Image (cartoon, rainbow, N blue to C red):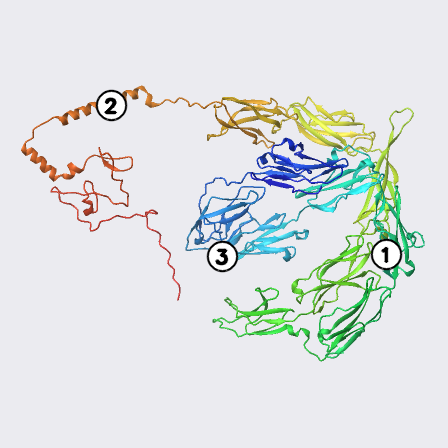
Amino acid sequence: MMEQPAEKVVVFPSDDIVLRCEATGNPPLMFRWIKDGHFFDPRREAGVTVVEGSGTLYINNSNTGQHQGTYRCYASNGLGTAMGPEIHVITESTPQWPKEKVTPFEVEEGESVVLPCDPPISAVPPKIYWLNSRIVHIMQDERVSMGQDGYLYFANVLATDSRPDYICHAHYLGPRTIIQKEPLELRVKPTNSVKFRQPRLMVPRGEMSSYVALRGGQPGSGIPTPSVEWTRLNGHLPMERVTFENSQKTLRIREVVEEDEGEYQCTARNTQGIARHSYTVAVEAAPYWAQQPQSRVYGPGESVRLDCSVYGKPTPMVSWWINGVPWRELVPEPGRMLRSGALILSEVQANDSLVAQCEAVNSHGRLLANAYVYVIQLPVKILTADGQHYAVVENQTVFLHCRTFGAPVPTVEWFTPQMEPALLDERAMVHTNGTLELSHAQRRDAGPYMCRAQNEQNNATIGAQLQVKGATRIERGPQSAVVKKSSNVTFECLARFDETIQERRHQIHLPPLLRYFIDPTALSIANVDYADQGVYSCRARTALDEAQASAELKVVGRYWLGAGEDRRVKLTWTPGDDHNSPIEKFVVEVEDQIREPGVWHEISTVPGLQPSAHLRLPPYGEFRFRVRATNYYGRSEPSPISAPVHTSQAAPERNPKGVSGEGNETNNMVITWQPLARSDWNAPELSYRVQWRLKDRGGRWSEETVTSPPFLVTDTPTFVSYEIKVQAVNPAGKGPDPATVVGYSGEDVPEGYPENVGVEILNSTSVLVSWTPPSKDKLRGHLRGFRVFYLRLGSVGEQSRHQVHPEVLTLHYTLNMVVFNGRGDGPHSEKIKFSTPEGVPGPPGSLVLERVSDTALGLEWTPPEFPNGVLSEYMLQYQQELGPLYEISFPVTQLNFTLGRLDPRARYRFHLRALTRVGQGAPRVLEGSTVPEPVLPTLDNISVSLVGHNFTIISWVPSRRQANVEFEIQYMGKTMAEPWRTSGQANSTHGSYQLANLQPGTSYRIRFVGRNHSGENVSFWETEVETNGTLLMTNQRNFATESWVVAFVCAAALLLLILLILCFVKRSKGGKYSVKDKEDTQVDSEARPMKDETFGEYRWVEAGQMGKVGEGKGMGGVPSLNGEVKALGSDDSLADYGGSVDVQFNEDGSFIGQYSGHKGKEAAGNDSSGATSPVTATAALE
């Protein structure tokens, strides 16, 4: 498989699904997919296409909701089947915030409050932001902050926090959607008595909690606002990987390692007290490889061992597959076994090519590796070119290469120039890759060498030419000297080289100073100074080797304060006004503008009567100072900043820690260390002087100067110990002499095997194995342990002439051992044979109980994992509590039984044993009951099979493993607000149910409800159905159609008609009036114009206006409380004079009231009818 796809794919309605499956192979490959354990055919799925030439699936967004599940891809050809990792496809709808009723949060000033968020749950958690209605972020600080749960925490509220638009926004990256919660209103009640409170932690509650990964928020409450600090109780915080976020309330550790496990404490502190919370942090990890199975070509007759070793926490569960088939489903074969997590294939043949899969799973992830076992016969081919030339100097080690290829793996043999086997010389060793290692080479070893490789197919040879040169030597090296300051000094260095080596030179590493003069054989220093002191080395180097000699220079002169005197400084200042309280002390603060610009640290404290301080500064810095005075009432503001003080460079004062050396190949060593912090450089640049040499052999040190770890030493012998030193160096000099540590070059598989292997028979199931470890030189690595391999060959019985079955059964085994190191297993020891007598078997592998009916239980079991002989029968014992014991025996071929005639609603205890001729084995114990347990029915292919005008029929396929499980059918109208109604009980065995008494043309929601193991009613299937036909409205009796109502209305209409006729007749009747009556009528009409002409019958009309009865339209409107009221009848209204519409008259028509003195509208506020609260007055002292 070429590509490892993501383990989890979350898709939304607008997304396409891409499931990648890319592989290569010859013969051509065929791809197939499994979904949820069943074959998945893309050609039969709408919207699914397969990329030509691969197994990659594309699913368009119109069908994504139907394709949720777990997928796995397989690629096969005639040589085997490779398997891809499981891909979990999760489909989600676009998140929406549910409708909710939000009530305001009312708190008193100074109290704490929490504003919740609770966004919709998604497989990909959203990012949370708090904004206001203007889309401006809510300001966060030590007092107001957002927790890891997305809630907004107020340690204490202020009056200015009152606002109606705290809005939580959730940003979902998958669907590229941002949704917002309903605005939350916070109302803060002002108070004149804000009380100080001790801090308390709002999240989490309590004093302790546990985290698998350290990423915890700590909002605190209290007034004054608490400050937050973090400490580690079982060690120091890893500051290089620690960041503090959210105003110190969140501690984040990057790149978590196992050493970060422990207890961490958060402390919230203010003037009123302290609150603490401790986290116990456990570091866990997804599976990762310790040893991954490797693909290889094998020849017929070879044995295959595939190791699969993983680390992780929790401990991963490792499983093996062959050609995509789980190990438990494979047909057992004698030559195929699992031992100590490794897959072993014995004596493979040409048709045994396969692909093995190792999969490791824990709660944090999974790991999958495909290993290809290709069995084929291939002739020997030597990959190293013929006629290679090798050169080495005397007493060094040389490696002659002979890389081979073939199946079976070729054997390699080297011959010296005298055509003798090279391994006859104890200095020679042949590695597994065919390389010849020759140590302590001498002049006589020069000449032509031959490598011969062979297997069952053929053999092949190549030649190699070895030249042995003379070693480089320094005949006259530099001599140590003690000279006076300002004098001159010269160091000589005379080297001798092998004249046949063309590339050779002297090397002297010195700083670029004009006082240094170098020629091929000497180094001269003019006008020496104390800075010139140190060790000077002359190195003579060729293409093959190098030599080095060193001398120390000491400079003497008259006594003075020392080279570090320029790093001492005396700081003085003039004290200021003490404000009538004596100064207790002065605090000196310093800023390093090179290492930490803008950061001030306390460097010294002196008594209040001492206006000066003597300070010692680190090398290579630019420092500024300021001083604060402290008296009984507190600390003053800082003084003006001093002029900068510069310190010169200096040699490092310490060396790196954590120096180690370990090889990752058979011929190298990787040297690593912890780099120095920049504050320890004492200069703008820093490098490391790495030295190494073979342990316990003395001799000169090899060295290199590098700028950072690691450093790789190549062409090393296999697994030898080295002495290693790493020294810090900068332009001003070297650090102190470094400590020596021991490292090792790379390991190779062991050459030896355990010897004197013996077996002591303890009993029928146990033996004691003893052995002698191989010698250390044959381990070729760190001893990791021993493996014991044993194989059962069969059994032999002893019988008399009159017995058909043997009396005594003996089991025969073979056993061998290997020793292993970090590189792998060594060769197997010789096989030894031993025999054990037959014993009692172990307990049956499993025992499963199933309720068949009220009086019957079914039992099914598997044979013992360790039969320890030939099984003769199974024995079942069972009884009720305090009841009699029953016993039944079964032949070894029977692995199930239905136990009938039991008491209903009774509980039983079962003991199942396997027997051999020796006796009974340990029992497998199980308890069961005939009482039916609540269980959800298992139904397949549920569908709506028929829909009528007022009914529907739902059908399903009953499960074969279940029978007579009752469940409810519930329904409710989809468009009507009504609760779920129960139609009746259904039986899982019947296969269908008719839901009747429905309304035609109506949509319904229908669901199945059953009881789970806890006895709770849960819905396990739901659908929607619309009945046929048209919904007819039911006839309702209307009081308007009742006969008595009709009669009453008719009578009223007739009476009204008669009255109208009488009025018309009276008004149309003529008459004569007297002059007196007429004048009286005129006087009355003039004296009372409002009564006759203006006032009449008024009514409220539909628009809320007042008008006269009989008028076509009402022209006036209802007066509002703050509107102007017009007088009726004329524009010259009395209300304009009296300021009111209520006007009273005397009998003579004069006004009773007086003029009000004003006229106009009276305003009323819309917000409140009462006066506003007074504002608290504040005053400031002058």
Which residue in the protein does label 2 denote?
1053
Q: Is residue 924 left or right of residue 1101?
A: right
The disc labelled 3 sits on which kind of residue?
Pro
Quarter of the figure that contains the N terminus: top right
Quarter of the figure that contains the C terminus: bottom left
Residue 656 is situated, as x and y percent measured from the top left of the image, at 71, 62
Q: Residues within 10 Å of mark 1 (few under 14, many from 20)?
A: few
Mark pair 2, 3: CA separation: 82 Å
Give whichever of discs 3 and 1 has the lower sequence position: 3
Q: Is residue 1158 left or right of residue 945?
A: left
Foreground tag (2 vs 1): 1
Residue 511 is situated, as x and y percent measured from the top left of the image, at 72, 70
Q: Secondary structure at mark 2?
A: helix
Which residue in the protein does label 3 denote?
224
Mark pair 3, 1: CA separation: 82 Å
Contact flag, marks 2 and 3 (Cβ < 8 Å): no
Query: From what the image shows, is residue 246 above or below residue 351?
Result: below
The disc labelled 2 sits on which kind of residue?
Ala
Contact flag, marks 3 and 1 (Cβ < 8 Å): no
Q: Residue furthest top?
A: 1043
Foreground tag (3 vs 1): 1
Which residue in the protein does label 1 denote?
389
Toward which corner of the image does residue 232 lie, by quadrant? bottom right
Residue 165 is situated, as x and y percent measured from the top left of the image, at 45, 48
Q: Which of 136/1115 is in front? A: 1115
Residue 313 is situated, as x and y percent measured from the top left of the image, at 68, 46
Q: Is residue 899 left or right of residue 605?
A: right
